[in-house]
């Protein structure tokens, strides 16, 4: 029985490691693309930072210019629950956790190597940019009618 427990624990650790690695791959991809492009839709940014740490966690990627900030949540595969949490909890906390940006317009974006249609539709409905892979670069996949929400 102890041998089985140890084996299951080791398997759990390996699976967790795979999940972390997939997340790292996604974050690297989107950071590199955004650092090169420095845009969310038609909004240009001057600087891009990753892994911005705060008391309750971190923001995956943050883009800045003189009057706006873009906050990007990166997932390997975008799920509706992650999108809801980001829009309803994470984005509203951003200006509280980083008050030096409270005077800036704040845009939210979700990025995923895999973006199911229901996730894209939900993110758009919540006013978030949606980023995904496109060949060796990324593209914004919002519809032509999309208008980003300004916080």
Image (spheres, rainbow, N blue to C red):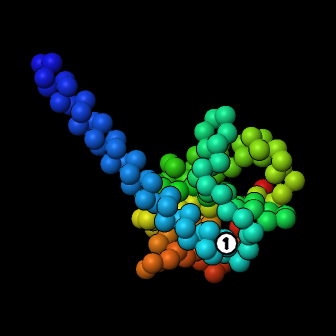
| Residue 4 versus residue 131 in the image, above or below | above
Question: Which x, y percent locates residue 81?
Answer: 50, 48
Question: Which x, y percent locates residue 140?
Answer: 58, 74
Q: Read off the residue under disc 1.
A: 38
Camera sees residue 150: no
Q: Residues within 10 Å of mark 1 (few under 14, many from 20)?
A: some
| Res 62 → quadrant | bottom right
Camera sees residue 57: yes
Instruction: Tell me what residue is drawn at x 74 percent, y 69 percent.
Output: 45
| Residue 125 versus residue 142 in the image, above or below | above
- Is 58 left, or right, of 5 in this rendering? right
Instruction: Tell me what residue is drawn at x 83 percent, y 47 percent.
Output: 100
Q: Give the quadrant of the N terminus.
A: top left
Task: Judge by depth and name the residue closer to the eye, 148 or 107.
Answer: 107
Which residue occupies the extreme right position in the image? 103
Check disc 1 and report its element: helix, strand or loop: loop
Question: Which x, y percent locates residue 90?
Answer: 65, 46
Instruction: Tell me what residue is drawn at x 21 percent, y 31 percent.
Output: 8
Question: Which x, y percent locates residue 83?
Answer: 55, 53
């Amino acid at each position: 029985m102890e041998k089985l427990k140890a084996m299951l624990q080791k398997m759990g650790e390996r699976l967790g490691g795979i999940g972390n690695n997939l997340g790292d791959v996604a974050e690297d991809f989107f950071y590199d693309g955004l650092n090169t492009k420095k845009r969310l839709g038609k909004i240009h940014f001057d600087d891009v930072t990753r892994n911005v740490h705060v008391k309750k966690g971190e923001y995956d990627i943050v883009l800045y210019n003189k009057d706006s900030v873009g906050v990007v949540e990166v997932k390997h595969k975008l799920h509706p629950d992650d999108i809801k949490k980001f829009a309803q909890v994470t984005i509203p906390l951003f200006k509280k956790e980083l008050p030096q940006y409270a005077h800036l317009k704040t845009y939210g974006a979700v990025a995923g190597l895999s973006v199911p249609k229901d996730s894209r539709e939900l993110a758009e409905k919540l006013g978030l940019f949606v980023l995904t892979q496109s060949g060796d670069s990324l593209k914004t996949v919002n519809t032509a009618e999309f208008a980003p929400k300004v916080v």
